[in-house]
Image (cartoon, rainbow, N blue to C red):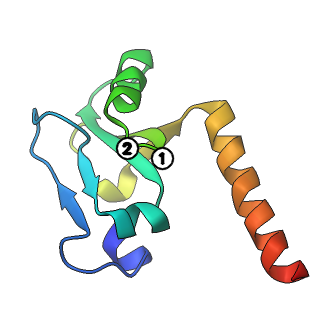
Amino acid sequence: MITEVFELGEGDVEWTSMGASGIDIKLSPKARAECPLSIECKKTRKHPAVAEMKQARYNAYKDTIAAVAWSPHCSGPEEAIITFNFQEFFNFLKEIRDERKGRTSG
């Protein structure tokens, strides 16, 4: 999904296996420029909470936003829910807004 949405090439996005160390979706520098997220993936019965967010932050790439993507047990990626830190999410939206303003006013 990330590859298609951001028109990335082969090798720009790699998914790690369950239990592997580090971030779960490894992004190339090009992919991080397009999608500045560090995503920790969970597939559990219970929605992830603080511990999973701490894990995502610990493993996050520099200058990206830590996030936890969660798919309920027995569901596919199309039903995944993503969790961000509230303040980081709004700072990210502000950056996008400011970037768009810069493109339209110049």
Task: Where is residue 40? Give x, y as percent.
Answer: 32, 39
Q: What secondary structure is found at the residue carrying circle 1?
A: loop
Where residue 41 is drawn, which disc sits there? none
- Residue 79 in the image: above or below residue 8: above
Amino acid type indicated by mark 1: Thr
Task: Name the residue rendered at 14%, 33% in the picture.
Answer: 21
The reply, left or right, for residue 40 in relation to residue 88 is: left
Residue 3 visible to an observer of this rendering = yes
For the C terminus, the image quarter is bottom right
Which residue position holds label 1?
64
Which residue position holds label 2?
61
Q: Residue furthest top?
A: 51
Q: What secondary structure is found at the residue carrying circle 2?
A: loop
**Few, some or many residues within 10 Å of mark 1 (<14, 14–19, 20+):** some
Res 22 → quadrant: top left
Residue 47 visible to an observer of this rendering = no
The reply, left or right, for residue 79 in relation to residue 9 is: right
The foreground one among 57 and 41 is 57
Task: Name the residue rendered at 46%, 65% in the picture.
Answer: 33
Q: Are marks 1 and 2 in contact (CB under 8 Å)?
A: yes
For the N terminus, the image quarter is bottom left
**How far is mark 1 from mark 2, CA to CA?**
6 Å
Task: Where is residue 29? Give x, y as percent.
Answer: 35, 63
